[in-house]
Image (cartoon, grey):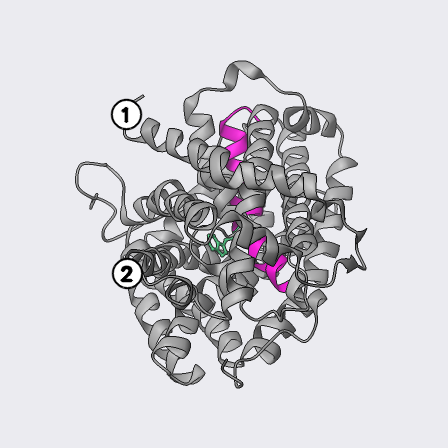
Amino acid sequence: MDNNREQWSSKASFILAAAGSAVGLGNIWKFPYIAGENGGAAFLFIYLICIVLVGLPILNIEILLGRATQKNPIGAFKTLTDKPFWKYVGALGVFASFTILSFYSIVGGWSVAYTFEALKGTFSSFDNPQMAADFFNLKNSNAMWVVGWHTVFFLMIVGIILSGVRAGLEKASKFLMPVLFVILMILVVQGLMLPGADKGTSFLFSPDWSKINPQTFLLALGHAFFTLSLGMGAMMTYGSYLSEKDDVVNASYLVAFLDTIIAILAGVAIFTVVFSSGYDPAAGPGLVFHVLPPLLAQLAGGYIFALLFFLLLTIAAVTSGISILEVSVAYLVDELKYSRKKATLTMGLLVYLAAIPCALSFNLWSDVTLLNTGLTFFDAADYLASNILLPLGGFFLAIFAGYVWGVDEVVRNLLIGDSNSVYFGNSIFKSPSFNKLFSFLVRYLSPILIFLVFLYVLGWI
Ligand code: TRP
């Protein structure tokens, strides 16, 4: 084993970092708008099912593979099997990290930009969401503006990664995650106090089943992967900085719980504001950038709320962005023996450039669509990652764990690690009957569900 490889200073640090990875734009930007477009509570329900049946087992497996091999995704598969096929599955993960970060960094850049706009008080002059949408479109029509803020966001994550696992990833998450939580709670409480807030909460909690169709399952499954940072080795890489004495099972459940609760709280914070002002929740990706700024700014104390909201979005994006880039950095460090600095600068530059077409999707290249999909680079990167690459990665992970590494080996490894968790006591999640259920999910249910969703995407069912 590589003695120089860094490890988290404690299990709690890992949990915060992994929660930092999971809680991101997916929770605060994406979840509210997908839920908004797909019937609110009905979507939430299907999404929760996907988290429990598919997300949780795969989250366990990913972290476990990382801890067991102490490697990046490509190295992890290479360590456990000689079959070259699996190396390519790892490589698919590295490719997915490029794809995700290329659009993620654009939205991260918007978040930083909007934090500054909030600071300047720009939003108080907007009377309605149309003005905010015009402002958003005007800013984005300037390629330099989009590329510039993408650059700022990128420099932030590269800076953190350069400092290493403990001084970078761990320290950032330890400081930023509590801040994120406090800000979110402030926004939730203020949202709930608005007149008409109950319309927002009932949208999120009382289902309209007629809104559900096969597309809902696809979106919910893709989003379950995205929001838990699964399917491309991010959790594996974070898991590789754990030691064998750290338990994986309880940590996974806690991370998934925090992620889900934070998505729901973000939904409450956003929908209470949107509904109490009588606006449409189905505004799509622009929901938090078009609809929210003027609505927040018009509240009493709105200057602060708008500022807090975009700060929240920025923090969420940064602690996730670092986990996406870390995958390919770890690959260069472990496999090609690069120094962390050289690996970060090399991958950072490559991914930074790969994101430029996504930045141009809103201006110079807004008419450029890929093949016959009608999607711009930005939309295509999001679609490809969330709906294809991540579920595909998850499918292979389940197959690998269930049939190649073997479910007995998985369970044996799951039981390693301090089970007297400070969080759950001696966990039921490590009991024999629970492990049977877990094996069933890994071998049968998760791969079959993912497979069915793929058949649907391909139009075969
Ligand atoms: N989970 C993050 C979010 O919800 C995004 C993210 C971070 C991610 N790392 C990832 C998505 C790895 C997929 C794979 O915003």
Answer whether labels 2 and 1 touch (C-beta < 8 Å). no
At label 2, the amino acid type is Pro
Residue 115: image quadrant is bottom right
Q: Which residue is mark 1?
A: 459
* Residue 185 percent across, percent down from the top left: 75, 49
Vertical position of residue 336 compared to residue 119: above or below: below
Q: Which residue is mark 2?
A: 84
Numbered label attached to residue 154: none
The residue at 68%/63% (across/down) is 417
* Residue 132 percent across, percent down from the top left: 49, 43
The residue at 56%/65% (across/down) is 67
Q: Name the mark nearer the viewer: 2 or 1.
A: 2
The local secondary structure at tag 1 comes to loop
The residue at 68%/66% (across/down) is 246
Q: Nearer the viewer, residue 116 or 323?
A: 323
At label 1, the amino acid type is Gly
* Other residues around mark 2 within 10 Å, as few (<14) / some (14–19) / many (≥20): few
Vertical position of residue 208 compared to residue 433: above or below: above
* Residue 198 percent across, percent down from the top left: 73, 26
Is residue 182 rendered to the left or right of residue 447? right
Q: Nearer the viewer, residue 108 or 445?
A: 445
Residue range (magenta) = 17-40
* Other residues around mark 1 within 10 Å, as few (<14) / some (14–19) / many (≥20): few
Q: CA distance from mark 2 to mark 1?
A: 30 Å
The local secondary structure at tag 2 comes to helix
Residue 359: image quadrant is bottom left
First-in-chain label (2 vs 1) = 2
| Prevailing SS of the magenta stretch | helix
Is 168 covered by the magenta stretch? no
Is 35 covered by the magenta stretch? yes
Q: Do we see residue 168 in this rendering?
A: yes
